[in-house]
Image (cartoon, helix red, strand yellow):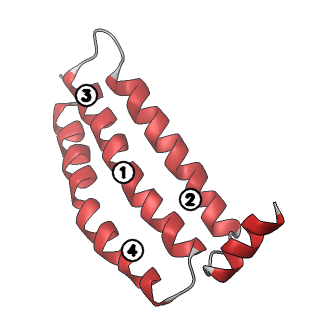
């Protein structure tokens, strides 16, 4: 266990409140997305909401990297978050449009 903590300190990986909060958000959005996509007899709006949560989970995972890694490479999470957030936004809009039906 001591070697693992030395590796984390040598690699500039420090877990704090924000990284654990984003791990929790990742686990929640991913499991909720899997649950909604695997429901039997689901509607089109449930499909869109499930896909929105599934595609939102990499966004949260990129924030885990951003909050736990301290180094110049930690800024590259922005490439993931900016590119990935457009997909859940499209699915949320589709969910709003298909919800009443």
> Dot 2, how many residues are within 10 Å of its Cα: few (below 14), some (14-19), or many (20+)?
many
Vertical position of residue 47 compared to residue 23: above or below:
above
Q: Which mark is first along the chain, 1 or 3? A: 3
Which x, y percent locates residue 92?
Answer: 26, 45
Q: Which mark is first along the chain, 1 or 2? A: 2
Judging by the rendered image, the residue that carries numbered circle 2 is 22
Q: Residue at x 23, y 37 (%)?
A: 95
Which x, y percent locates residue 38?
Answer: 35, 19
Which type of secondary structure does the marked residue at label 4 adopt? helix
In-front residue for pair 15/81: 15
Which type of secondary structure does the marked residue at label 1 adopt? helix
- Depth check, mark 4 against mark 3: the one in front is 4
Judging by the rendered image, the residue that carries numbered circle 4 is 77
Horizontal side, residue 90 vs residue 13: left or right: left
Q: Which mark is first along the chain, 1 or 4? A: 1
Which x, y percent locates residue 19?
Answer: 61, 65
Judging by the rendered image, the residue that carries numbered circle 3 is 47
Give the quarter of the image for residue 4. Answer: bottom right
Which x, y percent locates residue 70?
Answer: 57, 83
Q: Residue at x 62, y 81 (%)?
A: 12
Q: CA distance from mark 2 to mark 4?
A: 13 Å
- Depth check, mark 2 against mark 4: the one in front is 4
> Quarter holding the N terminus?
bottom right
> Dot 1, how many residues are within 10 Å of its Cα: few (below 14), some (14-19), or many (20+)?
many
Check contact, mark 3 vs mark 1: CB within 8 A. no
> Dot 3, how many residues are within 10 Å of its Cα: few (below 14), some (14-19), or many (20+)?
some
Horizontal side, residue 18 vs residue 52: left or right: right
Vertical position of residue 19 compared to residue 71: above or below:
above
Vertical position of residue 40 compared to residue 37: above or below:
above
Q: CA distance from mark 3 to mark 2?
A: 24 Å
> Quarter holding the C terminus?
top left
């Amino acid at each position: 266990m001591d070697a693992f903590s030395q590796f984390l300190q040598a690699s500039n990986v420090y877990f704090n409140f924000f990284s654990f909060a984003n791990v929790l958000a990742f686990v929640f959005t991913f499991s909720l997305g899997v649950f909604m996509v695997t429901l039997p007899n689901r509607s089109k709006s449930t499909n869109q909401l499930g896909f929105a949560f599934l595609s939102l989970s990499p966004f949260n995972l990129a924030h885990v990297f951003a909050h736990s890694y301290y180094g110049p490479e930690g800024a590259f999470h922005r490439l993931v978050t900016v590119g990935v957030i457009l997909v859940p936004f499209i699915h949320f809009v589709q969910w709003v449009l298909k919800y009443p039906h």
